Image (cartoon, rainbow, N blue to C red):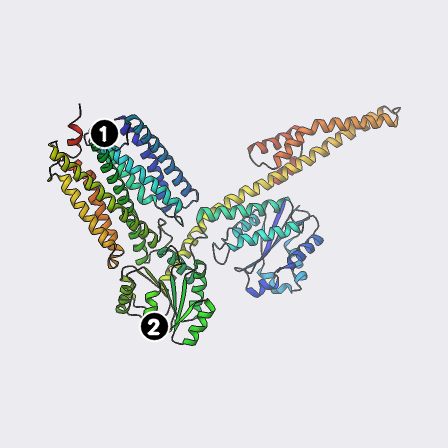
Amino acid sequence: MLDRLSVLCFAGTYGLALAAELARLVARAPIRWHLTLGLTLLGWLVHSVFLGNLAWREGQLPITSAFHSLLVLAWILVAIDLYLSVSAPKPATVGAFVLPMVLALLGAAVAMPPEARADWTRLGGWETVWGTAHGVLLLLGAVSTCVAFASGLMYLAQANRLKRKRPLRVGIALPSLEQSERWNRAAITLAFPLLTAGLAIGVILNATSRREGAAVLDWWDPKVISAALLWVVFAVLLHVRYRPEWRGKAVMLLTALAFAFLLFTLLGVDLLLPTSHGIARGLEVTP
Amino acid sequence: MKLLALGVDHHSAPQPVREAIAFDGSRRREGLEALKGRFPGVEFAILSTCNRVEVYAAGDPSTIPQVGDLTQFLAEFHGVDLGVFATHLVDYHDEEAIEHLFRVASSIESLVIGEGQIQGQVREAYEAAREAEAVGPILHEVFQQSARVGKRVREATGMDRGRLSIASVAVDVARRVFDRFDDKAVLVIGAGKMAELTLRHLAPLRPGRILVTNRSPERAQEAARAWGGRALPFEELESALVEADVVVSTTASAEPIVSFATYSRVLKARRYRHSLILDIAVPRDFDPRINDLETVTLYSVDDLQAQADANRSERLRAVEAASAIVQEETASCADAIRHRHLAGSILRQLGDYSDAVRSRELDRLFASRPHLSEDDRKAIAQTLHRFQNQLLHHPRSALRSATGAADGHGRSLVDAVRHLFGLGQSEARDDR
């Protein structure tokens, strides 16, 4: 409970950073960019200390529960936000797209049921290694998908502004179409192999456990079905991504769909549907 | 303390009048020397640009020239009849003069509101006056502050943001489509002045290749040579469009030269890579429906003009906020100058007052002791002088530091010294 309350500290700082970012819509001040960056960095440092403490306390990577995984996911996204904000060739409002996602992830982390866990370390042996690999790969795949989604939104906003001939200097500063498309392309290209490898390891782990007669996920478990659908959506997205005639808005909309599928698979299934994913592997050895 | 700004600008005088009394190049230095010689003890600075010619004067009310004196000076210095320019002159006094300079430095008074050149021109005017040893504490303060105020206004209002010409807005659009240009090809269709202007604005982006096509091959060759590009026959327009990432079209054709179907084919051949078409021809060279194609951004001359107008409106909207900042800074600057003047005056009066007391007491002493030798008298006078200096050392140091601080502490200190020594009642009131 205390951990969940602590999340409010850095979530609040990210909230302030987002408010500073969006303040551009009503007032212009050169200090705003520095304030946004400073607050984001401050929140990220507190976030880092929190995760570091968590890892030290548990003696392992803090990805054994949905709560922890979402915190790590948000932490990596903020790091990417900071990097892109500083390295973009001209000031672009990356935070306006990434920080809402980060806040939503932190909110979801707090809302996740405590029993949604997959504590592979308790299993021991090779299962711990592969279980951890399964979690890490899916987590990194989720990070890439979030970046692809955010850059897709930036692209759609910029494309809409240019197509409709909206005033270029009003509203938030967006990266060029070329830049956001490049970010989106790189993120999708990275997300697919990560998710594929993560899901494949999950399938292999389940199949092996089934042979050994241990508690396993049913192949018709909502988590398994949604994961399979997620993979199909990403395969289509990657295919479309390399079809020139689908360039632009279509890829970005499909990225949004893939992101929605990912959210559903990672969070929605645990919150809304009866699944024994994580619980099955974690609880069977819980003393 | 008095301040006067007198001159003409693009609001008050046509260009020939401004030119008639302009201080170009070395004339500014000559003007400053002439002003110094004619009005000794007065501070001067001359701001002379294409859109304004202004003389700033500051000093004691008894020595500072009147508007008529300066007008006469301008006529004599430039050898121009008074009737040519006198009715166009505008004068600003004291706080008005400070506010005017701040407005000028913030480019609120510029022909193109928000333009950045004026800041450098104000700085040049100050530097020239400083080199000619024509500025003193008042103009030094006002010009130094004007640079700061100009910067503050720009940062707070964003008045300098947003381009105002069609060609420069085209660059803004290009930078929202593409990130880098060294791997892009720019195709210019037609070779008119507008194409040249747009290319000149695109040049700092360093495009990788420039292609030129025109119905007249000779003109295409000529333009390609001038811009360091490659000329292509007009018959190869479609293949040129396939290669081009940015297209600038300025032909005088009465009908569109590129149809929707043609560009659809071009886009397919380009493998749907992003392209930006700047159709600045009237009537249009490109079918407007091409804008509906994904990955194509088409801007017509009207679209670019609308962007420029929107930027202009935004700058005009910023003027109100900028004026409020200027007013606030004017009050603060005038206050600081008045305070410095008052503190300086109290310092002088303190010296005069203590000298008078010392002389009076020495005279009384020597009158009552006529037998004192010359050496004794000298020793007593020196002792008293040292006593006076030591006694006043701290009040004087404190007053000197107070001249630079127009805050509450500085004011209290000046008031305290004034009351303690019973100084400058009337002068202090005048200065307030």
For the N terminus of chain B, the image quarter is top right
Residue A125 on image: x %, y %: 21, 30
**Which residue is rendered at x = 86% and y = 23% of the image?**
B369
Q: Label 1 amino acid?
A: Thr
What x and y, as percent, mark residue A114? Answer: 20, 29
Q: Marks 2/1: CA distance?
A: 68 Å
Which circle, 2 or 1, is nearer the viewer?
Answer: 1
Residue B404 screen position, x and y as percent: 60, 37
> Which residue type carries mark 2?
Glu
Q: What residue would you read off at disc 2?
A: B236
Q: Secondary structure at mark 1?
A: helix
Residue carrying label 1: A121
Q: Is residue A23 visible?
A: no
The answer to whether residue A110 is above or below residue A100 is above
Quarter in which the C terminus of chain B is drawn: top right
Q: Secondary structure at mark 2?
A: helix
Q: Nearer the viewer, residue B387 or B257?
A: B257
**Closest to the observer: B302 or A116?**
A116
